[in-house]
Image: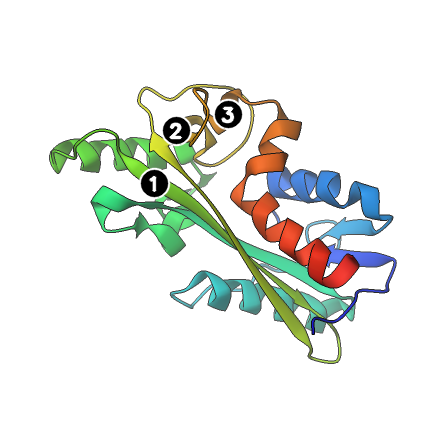
Amino acid sequence: MTRRFDGTRILIATHNAGKLEEMQQLFAPHGVQVVGAAELNLAEPEETENTFIGNARIKARAAVSATGLPALADDSGIEVEALGNRPGVYTADWAETPRGRDFLMAMTRTHTELEEAGAAHPRRARFRATLVLAWPDGHEEVFEGKVNGTLVWPIRGETGHGYDPMFMPDGYDITFAEMDPDEKNRVSHRADAFAKLIAGCFG
């Protein structure tokens, strides 16, 4: 039996403005005030695990410890089948530069590695998201979501973030970055995990 969330305020343990905005839209119907880690000047903990759940847990526990608020953390990434499911948990690492994250660089690296590997088309991939909701008393709930699709090149679209311009979900002929944000929020990996979170803790 999952624990019901009965608070009015939840901390989203992310410094990613795009991800925070997505979470605010997803939480809007549920009357919960969303606050982001950057607003509270929280440090970003080092993500030292090699699984999505491990890194989400690090972020959630650090946010709870720093603020005393219930915290929701997400760890997500893209798994490319022809690359042995890389970059996976290291998706953000592929985008790291001294000046911040550059996902055009990461997508270009992914495309280059696929070309060098002679990967056949369609180039299958999946986005995965793991949500960890942590309470100040140490209780945690975990929810996982995914969405399958194919990779396109050249990249397409102006909305979204991360690998969205390269990823075309199954059943669509447009990328996440070409989609209306409301539509993306309905079918994304994070939406899949979020639906399970809502059913489990807010339903």
Which residue is pictured at 80% across the width and 41% down the height?
Answer: 28
The disc, 3 or 1, on the residue closer to the chain's N-terminal end is 1
Q: Nearer the viewer, residue 17 or 116?
A: 116
Q: Image height check: is 47 above or below 81?
A: below
Q: Amino acid at mark 3?
A: Ala
- Report helix, strand or loop for mark 3: helix
Q: Residue 171: where, in percent of width, then height?
A: 45, 28
From the image, tell me which residue sits under label 1. 125
Q: Is residue 27 visible?
A: yes
Marks 2 and 3 sit apart, C-alpha to C-alpha, by 8 Å
Label at residue 177: 3
Label at residue 166: 2
Count numbered badges in the picture: 3
Marks 1 and 2 sit apart, C-alpha to C-alpha, by 10 Å
Q: Quick one: quadrant of the N terminus?
A: bottom right
The disc, 1 or 2, on the residue closer to the chain's N-terminal end is 1
Q: Amino acid at mark 1?
A: Ala
> Mark 2 packing: few (<14 Cα in 10 Å), some, or many (20+)?
many
Marks 3 and 1 sit apart, C-alpha to C-alpha, by 16 Å
Q: Amino acid at mark 2?
A: Met
